[in-house]
Image (cartoon, rainbow, N blue to C red):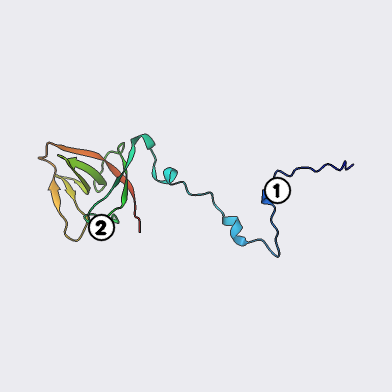
Amino acid sequence: MFSGKKIRDTFSHKKQKHSGFPSPASDYIENPIDLNQLLIKRPSATFLMRFKGEGMLLSGIKEDSILVIDRSLEPKNGDIVVASIGDEFFCRKIIIGRKKLLITNCLNNKTKDLDNLLDLEILGVVSSSINIY
């Protein structure tokens, strides 16, 4: 029996009027992209830094890119790292072989030999970079 009371539809915001067939694209709707979840695997060990210069252009890192740096990762041969030498910061590719080197990745590569540096600190491995256009 119908008592005359209106029943509140909690899904009224989902009522849509359709004419014809629903969009086939509605099958492919995804959740919003969460950049923290996508780019930061270990939040307590991760920090961001803005890159200045053109030394890593061939790695896809350009002026004003935002670097996502993970301090918990051990640098491996060929990784891009952020290092401090004295009071300067460098973002470079690390080469670990007979010698340890930091090299740029651009047309005019520059190399820094790490074997004799006493004030070198590897701050972390660059896990990704964000370019802003």
In the picture, measured across the screen, residue 62 lies left or right of residue 16, that is left
> Which one is nearer the viewer's eye here, 99 or 57?
57
- Residue at the limit of the structure toward the bottom, as seen here: 20
- Which of disc 1 and disc 2 is earlier in sequence? 1
> Which one is nearer the viewer's eye here, 120 or 52?
52
Residue 12 circle label:
1
State the residue at coordinates (34%, 48%).
128
Residue 123 point in image, percent of width and height: 25, 39
Specify the amino acid type for callout 1: Ser
Quick one: label 2, few (<14), some, or many (20+) residues within 10 Å? some
Label 2 vs label 1: CA separation?
52 Å
Say if mark 2 contacts mark 1, CB within 8 Å.
no
State the residue at coordinates (21%, 58%).
106
Label 2 SS: helix
84, above or below 29, in the image: above
Quarter-wise, where is residue 131 in the image? bottom left
Label 1 SS: helix
Quarter-wise, where is residue 105 in the image? bottom left
Specify the amino acid type for callout 2: Leu
**Which residue bears the numbered disc 2?**
57
Residue 8 point in image, percent of width and height: 75, 43
State the residue at coordinates (78%, 42%).
7
State the residue at coordinates (11%, 39%).
117
Residue 29 point in image, percent of width and height: 56, 54
